[in-house]
């Protein structure tokens, strides 16, 4: 017999019958065809769930996918996909098995769970006609608490428990939704420093309601997901299951037998919440506990009806499989998920899915000027890690946001950005300079006595130019600029006369050459500024108080000397000053000063002084310039007027050698990275608040050190540490 239903006729319920139609029905999502929705109106969380049929195998699965508005955000798509991949690591009898995950380059990410028939908790309550029996809630609590205990013991924070994420099946509950909260809010706080809850930037229905139900108060105040937040979310799910109410009705609304453990889970003070293993033991203590694998009769009938309504299909034997997909039911974890699993155990590697011991609070010394309150956070889990086995010889090049090209000793290796897979290696390409993009799918590798053009996609050698070896003609020095049609490079004759050469990439013939004064062909490799009609060369390496910074403009089409202009007030330093050009604005760094001049007139626009020497080149996005000084303080400066917008001191000890530092921006410009000798700090470009810190596992570098840089693709930050690369979701 069905257990008695407590409060079935008196409790107020906030649910509606599940929808019987779905406007997405019949839609193809990868290899799946949508059959029906599992969502119930008014119960949205950070994703939508539907029944779908695998067109390859005929198997019915539960498909979890983002809301369309959320999927428009490239960073969100990467985070959703990363969390879906990482969900393979969550194991246990009450975890919905992951049978398939969308390819990393899919337009719409998704994850497929192998559990059918299945109802979300809101749908189960609707089928039951009210709250579930106390015995069922107790059994559900024991199952989910056991799952959390195992997850937390393995360093995992679920960050996605909600009524919609819990499925009831004929064999008992199944937990889904891993990482949905992290994917939805990214590294942004749920509220601005403890203020009113704000909607996630992903703009889905749950966000419109003020954030996911059951969001712990500490996360509403800006903290990232932590293990004790999972306990609070579990308490909210059980309170909903026992009362049928989405809002917090207080302990008085709970059945007496459940009041104490659920109220403890919902404590505002995380220290007062129970540990999951203790909670599981508490829920098992009952006179006649319901089997963890049982469901009430009405729910079982609804599951049987669902199974009858969607019988399994047998696909025709000649059914073509979608490109890039293969049947994956019951497959072993992917190499990527195995790699990420190994990473969580690596000493010194901070993962966003780590346990409480991995979370570090960041505090700054009292600033000389007001700085925003730093938020606490650690880096998200890497999407992948790739170690280059040969010694890296030169700066890696990001090509087309899809390929990471890494030069080695006599070879070049290409790694695919989306999953870290090695695409190709080309050997016997010994060179004397860095890789550079030629446009048109080609990259240039300057050789010892030749120029080598490689296909970025395949590594195939497309052509070799041996005419600039310094014997019969000029000697190639270094590239200046390229636009897909022309390569401009600096060359010298036997008398060391500097010459700019325009080389036609299609005909592979020289278009023109123009000799320039020696100061514009200095020993340090430095690209020219490519403008609409001209090529700007600076005397950067030889500028001084007696020899002011000067630009020489050459015509792009014919090499004619158009004009020369001197910028007398540009400060210089023993180390070469560096430059950023934005429209008509020349921004130069030297010593502890950054200054801006109008290129067309030479007039000084503004200058800004840092507290310490500036070793980085800075990074520009829109009207804001970001740079870090030797005291590990990052500054945001309005380039229109040279005014300070914010500054933030790094958590790293300022005594660390900042001469190895770097400032970089994410592809969207929403995150600025400060790379120092110990770690990478990701800051929100809006106010300088800390998003996360990443200290990769020591590999090929001294203990606790970081030796590398950051490159940015849409939704991904590629962090190098010596010979290892980590891909982290960002923005």
Image (cartoon, rainbow, N blue to C red):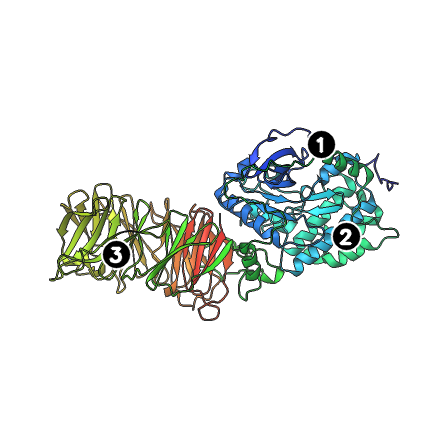
Q: Which residue is mark 1?
A: 309
Residue 210 at least partly seen: no
Q: CA distance from mark 3 to mark 2?
A: 64 Å
Q: How many marks?
A: 3
Density class for disc 2 (Cα within 10 Å; few <14, some 14-19, many ≥20) is: many
Give the residue displayed 63% in from the left and 50% down from the top: 330
Q: Nearer the viewer, mark 2 or mark 1?
A: 1
Q: Which residue is mark 2?
A: 142
Residue 641 at least partly seen: yes
Name of the residue lying farthest toward the left: 495
Question: In the image shown, does 516 or 365 lie closer to the viewer?
Answer: 516
Rendered image: mark on residue 526: 3
Q: CA distance from mark 2 to mark 1?
A: 31 Å
Counting residues from the start of the chain, the first of labels 2 and 1 encountered is 2
Counting residues from the start of the chain, the first of labels 1 and 3 encountered is 1
In the image, residue 558 lies at what x, y percent?
15, 43
Density class for disc 3 (Cα within 10 Å; few <14, some 14-19, many ≥20) is: many
Q: In the displayed structure, does residue 306 sit left or right of residue 445? A: right
Q: CA distance from mark 1 to mark 3?
A: 68 Å
Question: In the image shown, does 322 or 544 lie closer to the viewer?
Answer: 322
Check contact, mark 2 vs mark 1: CB within 8 A: no
Q: Nearer the viewer, mark 3 or mark 2?
A: 2
Q: Which quadrant holds residue 483?
A: top left
Which element carries disc 3, helix, strand or loop? loop
């Amino acid at each position: 017999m069905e257990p008695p239903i407590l409060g079935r006729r008196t409790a107020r319920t906030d649910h509606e019958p599940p929808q019987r139609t779905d406007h997405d029905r019949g839609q193809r999502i990868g290899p799946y065809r949508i059959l029906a929705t599992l969502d119930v109106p008014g119960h949205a969380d950070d994703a939508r769930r539907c029944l779908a049929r695998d067109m390859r195998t005929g198997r019915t699965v539960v498909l979890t996918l983002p809301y369309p508005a959320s999927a428009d955000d490239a960073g969100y798509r990467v985070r959703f996909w990363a969390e879906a991949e990482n969900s393979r690591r969550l194991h246990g009898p009450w975890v919905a098995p992951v049978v398939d995950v969308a390819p990393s380059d899919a337009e719409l990410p998704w994850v497929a769970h192998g559990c059918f028939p299945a109802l979300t908790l809101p749908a189960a309550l609707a089928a039951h006609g009210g709250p579930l029996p106390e015995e069922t809630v107790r059994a559900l609590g024991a199952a989910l608490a056991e799952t959390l205990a195992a997850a937390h013991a393995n360093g995992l924070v679920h960050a996605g428990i909600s009524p919609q994420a819990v499925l009831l099946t004929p064999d008992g509950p199944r937990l889904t939704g891993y990482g949905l909260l992290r994917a939805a809010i990214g590294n942004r706080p749920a509220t601005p420093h403890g203020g009113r809850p704000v909607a996630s930037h992903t703009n889905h229905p749950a966000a419109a309601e003020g954030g996911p139900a059951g969001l712990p108060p500490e996360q509403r105040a800006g903290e990232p997901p932590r293990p004790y937040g999972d306990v609070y979310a579990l308490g909210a799910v059980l309170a909903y299951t026992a009362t049928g109410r989405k809002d917090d009705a207080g302990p008085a609304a709970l059945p007496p037998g459940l009041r104490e453990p659920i109220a403890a889970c919902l404590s505002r003070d995380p220290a007062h919440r129970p540990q999951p293993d203790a909670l599981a033991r508490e829920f098992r203590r009952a006179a006649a506990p319901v089997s963890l694998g049982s469901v009430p009769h009405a729910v079982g009938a609804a599951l049987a009806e669902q199974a009858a309504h969607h019988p399994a299909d047998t696909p025709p034997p000649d059914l073509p499989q979608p490109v890039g997909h293969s049947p994956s039911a019951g497959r072993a974890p992917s190499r990527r998920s195995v790699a990420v699993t190994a990473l969580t155990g690596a000493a010194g590697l901070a993962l966003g899915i780590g346990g409480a011991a991995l979370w570090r609070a960041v505090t700054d010394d009292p600033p000389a000027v007001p700085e925003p309150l730093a938020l606490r956070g650690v880096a998200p889990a890497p999407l992948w890690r790739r170690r280059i086995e040969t010694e890296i010889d030169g700066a890696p090049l990001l090509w087309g946001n899809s390929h990471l090209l890494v030069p080695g000793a006599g070879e070049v290796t290409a790694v695919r950005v989306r999953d870290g897979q090695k695409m190709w290696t080309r050997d016997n390409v010994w060179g004397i300079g860095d890789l550079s993009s030629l446009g048109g799918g080609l990259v240039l590798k300057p050789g010892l006595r030749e120029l080598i053009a490689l296909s970025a996609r395949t590594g195939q050698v497309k052509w070799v130019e041996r005419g600039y070896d310094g014997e019969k003609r000029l000697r190639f020095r270094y590239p200046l600029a390229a636009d897909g049609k022309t390569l401009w490079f600096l060359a010298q004759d036997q008398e060391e006369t500097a010459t700019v050469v325009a080389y036609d990439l299609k005909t592979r013939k020289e278009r023109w050459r123009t000799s320039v004064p020696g100061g514009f062909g200095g020993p340090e490799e430095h690209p020219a500024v490519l403008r609409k009609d001209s090529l700007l060369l600076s005397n950067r390496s030889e500028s001084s108080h007696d020899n002011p910074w000067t630009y020489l403009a050459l015509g792009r089409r014919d090499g004619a000397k158009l004009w020369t202009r001197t910028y007398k007030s540009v400060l210089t330093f023993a180390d070469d000053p560096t430059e950023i050009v934005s429209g008509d604005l020349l921004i130069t760094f030297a010593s502890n000063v950054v200054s801006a001049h109008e290129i067309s007139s030479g007039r000084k626009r503004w200058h800004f002084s840092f507290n310490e020497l500036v070793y980085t080149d800075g990074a520009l996005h829109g009207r804001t310039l970001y740079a870090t000084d030797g005291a590990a303080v990052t500054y945001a400066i309005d380039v229109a007027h040279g005014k300070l917008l914010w500054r933030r001191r790094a958590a790293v000890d300022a005594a660390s050698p900042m001469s190895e530092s770097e400032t970089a921006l994410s592809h969207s410009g929403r995150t600025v990275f400060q790379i120092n000798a110990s770690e990478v700090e990701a800051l929100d470009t809006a106010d300088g608040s800390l998003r996360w810190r990443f200290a990769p596992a020591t590999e090929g570098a001294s203990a606790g050190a970081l030796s590398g840089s950051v490159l940015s693709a849409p939704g991904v930050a590629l962090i190098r540490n010596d010979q290892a690369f980590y891909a982290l979701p960002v923005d």
